[in-house]
């Protein structure tokens, strides 16, 4: 691959030679993960707790989201917390519980990596490696993700413009990995009624500019449980290829982000409503793998 791409110092994101740009690959990129398609007319639903807190919490929540219609299980073993005194995640122990949850439910796993030194270990356990909002500009981590051999769920930075976001994604693609899923998760604005301002117009803008699939995270995007289902449905209407939401079996006891985590019953209801919206939009929910749990 030509590593000199983008050398012309064009910061606009309009440089036609960028690998993320739609023209460099006329068709939409569709990412296949264990029989599930991300992109290409299907709507993927990724759900699970903010953090893996214990074996029981994860397995119970995994069963709940599986029953409710999730296609993939999320859960952080390494957590980027605002305060160093908040729960930081279980590390490799958490990854082991995620693996067990996948064996139990058949749901592929999405989990975050925060440190280049953990990339190899995280990739041994996970199906999709997540790079979180706070690390969107961590270029050494992006380069590692580019060579890790796994699809990457790459979240928009809380202060990043769309073009900065695409240029950051370019770091992953230029290492040879085009299996990148973009995720709008809200940006920081003057508005305080919501945790972040969920920039839903970023979805059609990204879809116009890039061939990569785009999903939406209305949990971090709004920070409030009641807003999650309505914004998840809105995400489908604006053309998202799926959503990622936080679900917890007992949100009131969660060690992180309980206030924005859905109860399993709310999640199930939301999926039913999303199915109708997807239908109206000429899409369908990705095939759920029904394994007996
Ligand atoms: C997450 O999805 O677990 C997370 C920490 O989100 P973000 O990076 O968008 O804040
Ligand atoms: Mn969270």
Image (tube, helix red, strand yellow):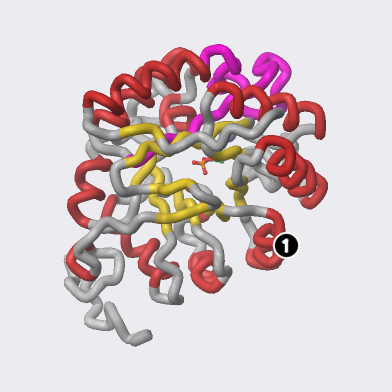
Rendering quarter of residue 216: top left
Indicate whether 230 appears above or below 52: above
Image label count: 1
Left or right: 286, with 120 as reference point: left
Q: Is residue 293 left or right of residue 285?
A: right
Q: Is 246 one of the magenta-colored residues?
A: yes
Q: In the drawing, does residue 289 fall left or right of residue 185? A: right
Observer able to see residue 231: no
Quarter of the image holding residue 217? top left
Residue occupied by mark 1: 121
- Which residue occupies 21% across, 73% down? 10
Check if residue 151 falls in the magenta segment. no
Q: Residues within 10 Å of mark 1 (few under 14, many from 20)?
A: few
Numbered range of the magenta stretch: 241-266
Is the shortest distance between ligand 1 and the CB of mark 1 under 8 Å? no
Name the residue rendered at 48%, 32% in the picture. Answer: 220
SS at mark 1 in the image: helix
Picture coordinates of residue 158, whole percent (x, y): 42, 43
Q: In the image shown, does 77 or 212 lie closer to the viewer? A: 212
- Up/down of 97 relative to 26, above or below: above
Determine the residue positioned at 62% across, 47% down: 111
Q: Residue 23: give x, y in percent of width and height.
A: 18, 66
């Amino acid at each position: 691959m030509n590593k000199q791409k983008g050398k012309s110092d064009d910061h606009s994101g309009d440089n036609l030679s960028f690998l993320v740009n739609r023209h460099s690959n006329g068709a939409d990129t569709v990412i296949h993960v264990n029989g599930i398609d991300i992109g290409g007319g299907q709507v993927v639903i990724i759900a699970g707790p903010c953090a893996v807190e214990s074996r029981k919490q994860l397995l119970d929540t995994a069963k709940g989201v599986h029953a409710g219609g999730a296609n993939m299980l999320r859960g952080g073993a390494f957590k980027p917390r605002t305060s160093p005194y908040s729960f930081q995640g279980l590390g490799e122990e958490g990854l082991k519980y995620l693996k067990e949850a996948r064996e139990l439910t058949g749901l592929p796993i999405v989990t975050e990596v925060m440190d280049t030194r953990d990339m190899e270990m995280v990739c041994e356990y996970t199906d999709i490696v997540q790079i979180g909002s706070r690390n969107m500009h961590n270029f050494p981590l992006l380069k590692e993700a580019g060579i890790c051999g796994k699809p990457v769920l790459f979240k928009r930075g809380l202060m990043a413009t769309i073009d900065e976001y695409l240029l950051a994604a370019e770091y992953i693609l230029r290492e040879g990995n085009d299996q990148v899923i973009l995720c709008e998760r809200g940006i920081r604005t003057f508005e305080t009624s919501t945790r972040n301002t969920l920039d839903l117009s970023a979805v059609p803008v990204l879809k116009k500019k890039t061939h990569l699939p785009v999903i939406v995270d209305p949990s971090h995007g709004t920070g409030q449980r009641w807003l999650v289902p309505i914004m998840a449905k809105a995400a489908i209407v604006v053309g998202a290829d799926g959503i990622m939401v936080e679900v917890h079996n007992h949100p009131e006891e969660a060690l992180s982000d309980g206030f924005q985590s859905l109860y399993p019953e709310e999640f199930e209801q939301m999926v039913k409503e999303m199915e109708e919206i997807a239908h109206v939009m000429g899409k369908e929910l990705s095939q759920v793998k029904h394994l007996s749990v």
